C-alpha cells in the first residue's frame, strides 16, 4: 500500500478548528476543487476545540496540528482567528516560513503572511440597506455577537451607518447580543420581545446565520410570522441557511474569489514568482431568502424544507445510535485488536468514505509487541473501484514511520483528506485520516460523532489495559518472591497443579528438589546483607536452570527452596547437575566466600502428587537435611577455609 511522503506531492495544508461547526465546508470544497484543478492536494487538519482554554483536553486536540511538521507543504492556510491558542498559530506559521512557502492567515494578521479577510462591514451594511430600501423597514433591531469583539463592532458600525444614511436615528437600546451562538441568541430574542412590548420591530438583522435561525425559532414559538410580521436576516451564508424554513436571507462570502486567489498565488510562486505577502479583502454577496420576503413561501417549499430538515435530523439520530451501540457492545474488556475487528460494521455504516485510524499501541498494552509508537490500526478503504477493495475493512496493525500520514489512495476520489485527533485529554492516542467530502451536509458531523464515541471506547480500552497491568503486577506480588522472582509458597502450589496435569498427559513422573542455602547467616554477618542477597539469588538461578524450562521453582523462606519438574532423569543425574551448577556459580562469582546449598531429591507419580504432595515434600526435605548434616557447612557455623567439594 503506497503512502503519502513528505515531498512526493504538491500539497496545500489547511488548519481550521471546529470544522463541524464553523460553516467553512463550502469554502473548503471550493479550495479543494481549485487546488485539484491546479494539480494540488489538500490536507485539512481540524479539531473540536478553539484551543482557548489550554486545558488537558485542548492539549490533546492541538496534537493534530503537530502533524504538519511531517509534511513538505507547497503552501499553508491557517485560520489563526479561529485557533485561539497563540503557541499553535506561531508553530504553524513558523513551520511555513521554515519551509520557505507562502502562508495565508485568515482573518487575523500575522507578520510575513498573506492576510485573507472579507469586507464584513460594507457587506453587512448592504444587507441593512436591502431591508430598508427594498422592504421599507424603519424600526430595525439588531442581534449582534458580543461586546468588544472586533467582528461584532464591525457589524454594529455597519448597522448604524446604514440607518443614519437612510435618516433613521440609531438607538443603542435596539442592539442585543447573542454571542454568535443559538442559545444566547434565543435568550436575547426573548428579552427583545419583552422590551418592545406590543410594538414589534419591522426587522431583526443578525450578526450571523446561526443567530438568525435562533431568532426565527423564538418568533415562531410566540406565533409571530416571519417575514409577514418581522423580517429576519443573517450573515455568513452557512448551509443551514438554505435548509432551514424559512430560508434565511443572508450575506454569503465570495469563497470562489478568495480560494481562486489563494491557489493562483501558490501556483505563481511554484512557477518562480517571489513570495510577496499582502492583504486581500473579498466581498459578500446578498443571498435572498424567504425570511425577508424576497423568496415566496409556498406550501411545497415549506414541505420541502421540513422534509430536508427531518431527513437530516433522522440521519443524525441514526448514526449517533449506531455509534452508541458500537461503544456499548465493546465494553467487555477485550484487547484493542479484538475491539477494532468488532467495530467493522459500525465504522462501515457511519463512515462510508475511506478512513484510516493511526494509534500509538503503547497506550493499549502493545498487544503485538511491536515496540513502536505509530501503527495503522484499522482501515476502511475508499470504494471508487469495488474490484480494488473487495473487503474494505481491515485491521493491519502494522508499524508506520513518523513521517507517514496516510495511504495515497485516500486522495483518489476527492483530492483532499481530513485529519482529526484521537485522544483522552492529554493522552494522545493518534489520529484519523479520512476522505474529505464537504458537499455532504452531515459529513463533518459524522466524523465528529464517530471520533467522539471512538475516544470513549479507546479510553475504556486504555483503562482496561492499565487495570490488567495492575492486576498482573498484583498477581505477581501475590505469587512471586520479589528478590528472586521465584514463586512463593502460594504460587508454587498453584503452578504445581498445572504441572501435575501436564505430567499425567505425558505419562511421566515428577521430580521434586528441596534445597537450602548453607551459611547465609555467616555471609550476612561478615559481608553484609547485599552479599547474602547475592547468594540467595544465585541459588534461585541455579535451581531454575536445574529444573529446566517448564519447571516450577519457589523460595519457601529466607534460605529454603523447592522445585518440581517433569524429568526422565534419575535423582542421581539431577543431583550431579546440581553440583556442577554450584561449581560453575562459584567459579564465575569470584566471591571471598563459597556459595553452597544442600539438596534432597524425590520422585513421585502424578497420582501420588495429587494425593499426598506434602508427604513427597517431607521426604525430599529429609534427604536435604541428611545431606546438610554431613556437609562441612551449616547456617550457624563459620565457614572453614576449604572450598566445597
Image: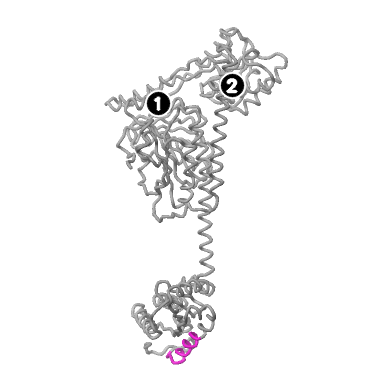
Q: Which residue is mark 2?
A: 212
Tell me where residue 345 appears, x and y as whole percent: 48, 42
Mark 1 element type: helix
Bounds of the magenta span? 619-632
Residue 13, can we see it?
Answer: yes
Q: Is residue 620 within the magenta segment?
A: yes
Residue farthest toward the bottom in the current orientation of the protein: 630
Q: Is residue 42 above or below residue 371?
A: above
The residues tagged by marks 2 and 1 sit, at their Cα atoms, a distance apart of 27 Å
Tell me where residue 223 appears, x and y as whole percent: 69, 19
Q: Quadrant of residue 540?
A: bottom left
Q: Depth check: give the residue in front, 317 or 138.
A: 317
Tell me where residue 603 appears, x and y as whole percent: 45, 83
| Apparent side of residue 387 relative to residue 512 in the rendered image (left or right) | left
Residue farthest toward the right in the current orientation of the protein: 198
Q: Which residue is mark 1?
A: 31
Q: Is residue 307 above or below residue 497?
A: above
What quarter of the picture does the C terminus occupy?
bottom left
- The dominant secondary structure in magenta is helix
Amino acid at each position: 500500500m503506497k503512502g503519502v511522503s513528505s515531498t512526493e506531492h504538491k500539497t496545500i495544508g489547511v488548519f481550521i478548528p471546529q470544522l463541524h461547526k464553523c460553516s467553512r465546508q463550502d469554502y473548503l470544497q471550493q479550495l479543494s476543487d481549485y487546488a485539484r484543478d491546479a494539480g494540488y492536494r489538500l490536507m485539512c487538519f481540524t479539531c473540536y476545540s478553539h484551543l482557548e482554554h489550554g486545558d488537558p483536553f485542548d492539549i490533546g486536540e492541538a496534537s493534530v496540528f503537530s502533524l504538519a511538521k511531517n509534511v513538505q507543504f507547497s503552501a499553508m492556510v491557517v485560520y489563526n482567528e479561529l485557533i485561539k491558542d497563540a503557541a499553535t498559530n506561531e508553530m504553524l506559521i513558523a513551520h511555513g516560513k521554515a519551509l520557505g512557502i507562502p502562508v495565508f492567515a485568515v482573518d487575523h494578521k500575522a507578520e510575513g503572511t498573506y492576510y485573507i479577510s472579507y469586507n464584513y462591514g460594507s457587506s453587512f451594511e448592504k444587507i441593512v440597506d436591502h431591508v430598508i430600501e427594498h422592504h421599507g423597514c424603519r424600526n430595525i433591531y439588531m442581534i449582534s455577537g458580543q461586546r468588544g469583539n472586533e467582528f461584532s463592532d464591525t457589524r454594529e458600525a455597519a448597522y448604524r451607518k446604514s440607518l443614519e444614511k437612510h435618516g433613521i436615528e440609531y438607538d443603542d437600546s435596539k442592539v442585543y447580543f447573542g454571542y454568535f451562538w443559538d442559545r444566547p441568541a434565543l435568550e436575547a430574542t426573548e428579552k427583545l420581545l419583552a422590551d418592545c412590548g406590543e410594538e414589534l420591530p419591522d426587522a431583526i438583522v443578525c450578526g450571523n446565520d446561526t443567530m438568525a435561525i435562533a431568532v426565527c425559532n423564538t418568533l415562531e414559538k410566540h406565533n409571530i410570522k416571519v417575514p409577514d410580521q418581522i423580517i429576519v436576516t443573517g450573515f455568513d451564508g452557512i448551509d443551514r441557511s438554505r435548509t432551514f424554513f424559512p430560508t434565511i436571507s443572508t450575506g454569503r462570502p465570495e469563497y470562489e474569489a478568495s480560494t481562486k486567489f489563494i491557489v493562483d498565488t501558490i501556483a505563481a510562486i511554484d512557477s518562480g514568482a517571489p513570495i510577496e505577502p499582502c492583504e486581500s479583502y473579498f466581498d459578500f454577496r446578498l443571498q435572498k431568502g424567504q425570511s425577508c420576503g424576497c423568496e415566496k413561501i409556498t406550501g411545497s417549499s415549506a414541505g420541502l424544507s421540513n422534509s430536508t430538515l427531518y431527513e437530516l435530523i433522522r440521519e443524525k439520530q441514526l448514526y449517533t445510535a449506531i455509534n452508541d451501540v458500537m461503544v456499548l457492545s465493546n465494553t467487555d474488556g477485550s484487547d484493542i485488536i479484538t475491539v477494532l475487528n468488532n467495530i467493522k460494521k459500525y465504522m462501515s455504516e457511519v463512515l462510508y468514505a475511506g478512513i484510516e485510524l493511526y494509534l500509538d499501541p503503547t497506550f493499549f498494552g502493545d498487544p503485538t509487541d511491536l515496540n513502536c509508537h505509530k501503527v495503522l490500526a484499522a482501515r476502511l478503504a475508499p470504494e471508487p473501484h469495488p474490484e480494488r477493495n473487495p473487503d474494505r475493512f481491515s485491521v493491519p496493525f502494522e508499524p508506520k514511520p513518523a513521517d507517514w500520514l496516510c495511504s495515497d489512495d485516500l486522495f483518489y476520489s476527492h483530492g483532499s483528506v481530513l485529519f482529526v485527533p484521537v485522544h483522552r485529554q492529554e493522552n494522545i492516542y493518534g489520529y484519523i485520516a479520512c476522505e474529505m467530502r464537504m458537499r455532504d451536509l452531515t459529513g463533518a458531523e459524522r466524523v465528529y460523532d464517530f471520533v467522539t464515541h471512538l475516544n470513549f471506547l479507546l479510553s475504556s480500552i486504555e483503562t482496561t489495559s492499565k487495570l490488567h497491568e495492575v492486576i498482573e503486577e498484583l498477581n505477581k506480588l501475590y505469587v512471586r518472591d520479589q528478590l528472586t522472582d521465584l514463586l512463593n509458597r502460594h504460587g508454587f502450589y498453584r503452578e504445581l497443579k498445572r504441572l501435575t496435569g501436564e505430567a499425567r498427559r505425558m505419562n511421566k513422573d515428577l521430580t521434586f528438589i528441596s534445597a537450602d542455602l548453607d551459611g547465609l547467616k555467616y555471609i550476612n554477618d561478615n559481608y553484609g546483607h547485599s552479599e547474602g542477597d547475592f547468594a540467595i539469588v544465585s541459588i534461585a538461578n541455579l535451581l531454575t536452570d536445574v529444573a529446566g524450562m517448564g519447571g516450577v521453582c519457589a523460595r519457601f523462606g529466607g534460605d529454603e527452596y523447592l522445585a518440581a519438574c517433569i524429568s526422565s532423569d534419575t535423582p542421581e543425574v539431577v543431583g550431579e547437575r546440581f553440583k556442577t551448577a554450584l561449581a560453575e556459580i562459584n567459579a564465575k562469582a569470584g566471591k571471598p566466600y563459597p556459595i553452597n546449598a544442600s539438596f534432597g531429591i524425590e520422585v513421585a507419580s502424578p497420582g501420588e502428587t495429587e494425593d499426598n504432595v506434602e508427604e513427597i515434600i517431607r521426604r525430599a526435605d529429609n534427604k536435604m537435611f541428611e545431606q546438610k548434616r554431613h556437609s562441612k557447612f551449616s547456617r550457624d557455623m563459620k565457614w572453614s577455609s576449604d572450598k566445597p567439594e
